[in-house]
Image (spheres, rainbow, N blue to C red):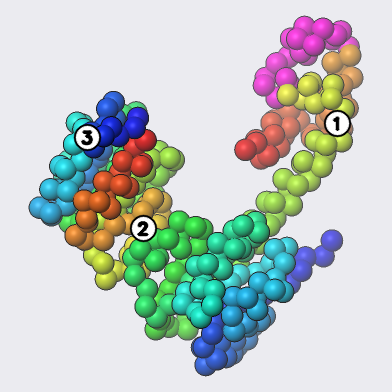
């Protein structure tokens, strides 16, 4: 599946700020879309859309912080860079505790914002790649039979085939067959790889 | 480990306060009665050594360490103890520093002068 292009979403009620940010991002070769309110953005954004957000804290109607809460409820992982002209520590701490990527006070230099946007986009790419990787592992796990899953759990605990056979009350040969199926279905080249896969999806 | 009605905490672990801290901060921390084991390492290096201990329950980085490389320290402390609550007390004007501290692993940043209520609440919650 081809990756969707990354977009920097700018949400700010101030027309001048919105337009200048859009121009700045465009000049840096970054695709940007702007919304004048949190509601406008939320009505069209899908969490699968990659990129990052440049979000004003204070806006009439839904504030930037409220919009962040809403995105969290939707399970969005898009990195959020807050911008504000009147930031204080409690506000910044709240934003960061709720997962903001950064919190920038106006006025800021163009380059400062561009650097942060680039870092946020890199983080989003990395996160989505990791998510795809764990999704694939989960799909493979779901394809295992209940018995194969039991064998997988025991071998990744470090148990030898003989011990697994004893635990499950089956012959060693049967364990070997199940184990071969597990390795095949999980597309694992070695036990170490299988262990790494299980660690990647463990909570 | 819940705080009882007297505001005292039983069986709590150590609070590490890095830096000497201002008198006001000191006073506020002393008010956290029941945290019988409060230690005051005078350097970030010795604070880090304490942070690695099993008894470490909470780390407070006081306001006199603003000139020190706090971010690096926070990162190292976080590597030592992934779930340790770490509070940084800082100048209310320095939002950028607060954001940076949060990015590097602080649980929360509290403004100077810290209020009894704010700090007690944060530390008590963290120690539970």
Q: What's the chain of the residue with tag 1?
A: A
Secondary structure beneath dot 3 equals: loop
The lab-note entry on whether marks 2 and 3 share a chain reads yes
Checking the image for residue A57, the label placed there is: none
Residue B41 appears in the figure: no
Q: Residue sitting at 69 percent across and 67 percent down? A: A50
**Label 1 belongs to which residue?**
A144
Is A118 included in the stretch rendered in magenta? no
- Using the rendered view, name the quadrant where residue B31 is placed: top left
Q: Residue sitting at 43 percent across and 77 percent down? A: A84
| Magenta region, residue range | A154-173
Q: Main secondary structure of the magenta part?
A: helix
Dot 2: within a 10 Å radius of its alpha carbon, few (fewer than 14), some, or many (20 or more) residues? many
Secondary structure beneath dot 1 equals: loop
Residue A11 x %, y %: 57, 79
- Using the rendered view, name the quadrant where residue A150 is placed: top right
Q: Residue furthest bottom?
A: A16
**Label 2 belongs to which residue?**
B101
The lab-note entry on whether marks 1 and 3 share a chain reads no
Viewer-proximal residue, A175 or A42? A42
Give the side of residue A54 with respect to residue B101, left or right: right
Is A157 included in the stretch rendered in magenta? yes
Give the side of residue A200 with respect to residue A103, left or right: right
Residue B25 x %, y %: 16, 52
**For the residues bearing labels 1 and 3, Cβ distance under 8 angstroms:** no
Dot 3: within a 10 Å radius of its alpha carbon, few (fewer than 14), some, or many (20 or more) residues? few
Residue A178, above or below B30: above
Residue A103, above or below B25: below
- Using the rendered view, name the quadrant where residue B115 is placed: bottom left
**Label 3 belongs to which residue?**
B6
Residue A129, above or below A175: below
Dot 1: within a 10 Å radius of its alpha carbon, few (fewer than 14), some, or many (20 or more) residues? some
């Amino acid at each position: 599946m081809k990756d969707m292009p990354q977009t920097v979403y700018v949400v700010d009620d101030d027309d001048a700020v919105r337009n200048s940010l859009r121009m700045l991002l465009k000049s840096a070769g970054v695709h940007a879309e702007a919304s004048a309110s949190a509601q406008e953005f939320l009505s069209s954004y899908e969490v699968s859309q990659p990129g990052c957000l440049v979000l004003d804290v204070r806006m009439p109607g839904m504030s930037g912080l409220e919009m962040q809460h809403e995105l969290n409820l939707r399970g969005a992982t898009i990195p959020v860079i807050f911008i504000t002209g009147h930031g204080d520590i409690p506000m910044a701490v709240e934003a960061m505790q709720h997962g903001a990527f950064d919190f920038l006070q106006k006025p800021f230099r163009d380059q400062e914002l561009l650097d942060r946007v680039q870092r946020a986009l890199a983080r989003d790419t990395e996160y989505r790649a990791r998510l795809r990787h764990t999704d694939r592992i989960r799909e493979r796990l779901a394809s295992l039979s209940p018995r194969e899953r039991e064998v997988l759990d025991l071998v990744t605990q470090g148990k030898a085939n003989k011990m697994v056979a004893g635990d499950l009350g089956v012959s060693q040969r049967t364990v070997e067959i199940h184990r071969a199926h597990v390795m095949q279905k999980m597309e694992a080249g070695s036990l170490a790889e299988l262990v790494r896969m299980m660690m990647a999806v463990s909570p | 480990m819940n705080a009882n009605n007297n505001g005292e905490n039983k069986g709590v672990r150590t609070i590490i306060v890095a830096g000497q801290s201002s008198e006001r901060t000191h006073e506020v921390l002393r008010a956290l009665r029941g945290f019988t084991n409060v230690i005051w390492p005078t350097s970030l290096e010795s604070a880090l050594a304490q942070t690695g201990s099993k008894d470490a329950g909470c780390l407070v980085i006081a306001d006199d360490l603003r000139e020190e490389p706090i971010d690096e320290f926070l990162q190292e402390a976080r590597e030592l103890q992934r779930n340790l609550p770490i509070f940084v007390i800082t100048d209310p004007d320095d939002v950028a520093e607060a954001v940076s501290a949060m990015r590097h692993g602080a649980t929360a940043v509290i403004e100077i002068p810290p209020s009894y209520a704010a700090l007690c609440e944060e530390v008590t919650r963290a120690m539970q």
